[in-house]
Amino acid sequence: MKFDMHTHTKAGSLDARATIPQLASVLIQNGFDGMLITDHNSYKGYDQFQSQRSRHPELCRFVVLRGIEYDTCDAGHMLIIMPDDCDVPILEIRGMSVLPLIRIVHQLGGIIGPAHPFGNGSMAIMNSRIIRRHRSLLKEFDFIEVFNSTLSASSNLRARLLNNILNLVPFAGSDAHSQRNAGTAYTEFASDIFCNNDLIRAVKEKSGITAAGDQERCLRRYKPAFVRMLGISMYWLYNQSTALYRYPSRRRFFHHFII
């Protein structure tokens, strides 16, 4: 089965412009069987779609999986998939450190891996201090995104070379924030994937999963360097300030887990 494993919706991500039905229509036309919704620190896009799914009979055979892209305070962005019917409110509160995040996800039976590991600034784990000091941390992940359509060919190549050493399950995703970019990367599964539990089982079995992409759109082509750097810096400031503001909420939820 063919999936786009990194997509965003306007209901769940401030920087996205597409709905799930809009993304799905593009993917279906291109032979995809499903997609993973990975909004930033939010399940709102997926939950909204589930509440309105009866209005979209054309998607009855299309699989929509529930994931999240979590903003850590020290290791960039993480893609997380939790078991079906597993509600973890702390995953919607950005700013946790990567080590307790990994432990919570695994404790509850989920899987976790770095998005765009050689991406931009603080959004990428390979730019973080924690990895420079503790390289072995990479072995704690279940998968790694080896192809992201927003990055350059060299960044994706470095991710693949890294995974040749780590031997994690490879994921590929378009990182689509609009219809135009949906389906420019894909992950294929030899087994049937109809729900989160199926996906988690397939990843843990580590067999019959391949990842590739059709294009790398590299944001440098569309934005001057200073504009990109300003955006990256502003995002870092927003992420850090919001993480600090949400610290009391994270601490309350954190007491529900034994780390």
Image (tube, rainbow, N blue to C red):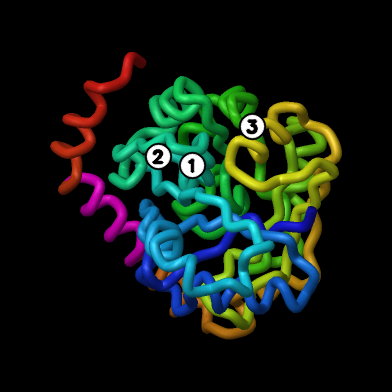
Q: At 23% across and 36% down in the image, what residue appears?
A: 250
Q: Is residue 195 above or below residue 106?
A: below
Residue 142's disc number = 3
The answer to if 185 sits in the magenta stretch is: no
Q: Is residue 64 left or right of residue 243?
A: right
Secondary element at image label 2: loop
Residue 34's disc number = none
* In contact (CB < 8 Å): disc 1 and disc 3: no
Q: Is residue 235 above or below residue 90?
A: below
Given this view, does label 3 or label 2 mark the residue nearer the observer? 3
Q: Main secondary structure of the magenta part?
A: helix
* In contact (CB < 8 Å): disc 2 and disc 1: yes
Q: Is residue 21 left or right of residue 104?
A: right
Determine if residue 232 is in view.
no
Secondary element at image label 3: loop
Q: Which residue is mark 1?
A: 128
Q: Is residue 147 left or right of residue 127?
A: right
- What amino acid type is highlighted by mark number 2? Asp
Where does residue 46 sit, x and y in percent of width and height? Answer: 44, 59
Q: Which residue is mark 2?
A: 74
Q: At 58% across and 41% down in the image, what residue appears?
A: 196
Crowding near the residue tagged with mark 2, few <14, some 14–19, many ≥20 C-alpha atoms within 10 Å: many
Q: At 23% across and 53% down in the image, what residue appears?
A: 242
The answer to if 238 sits in the magenta stretch is: yes
How far apart, in angstroms, are the residues tagged by discs 1 and 3? 19 Å
Determine if residue 224 is in view.
yes
Q: Which residues are magenta?
A: 234-244
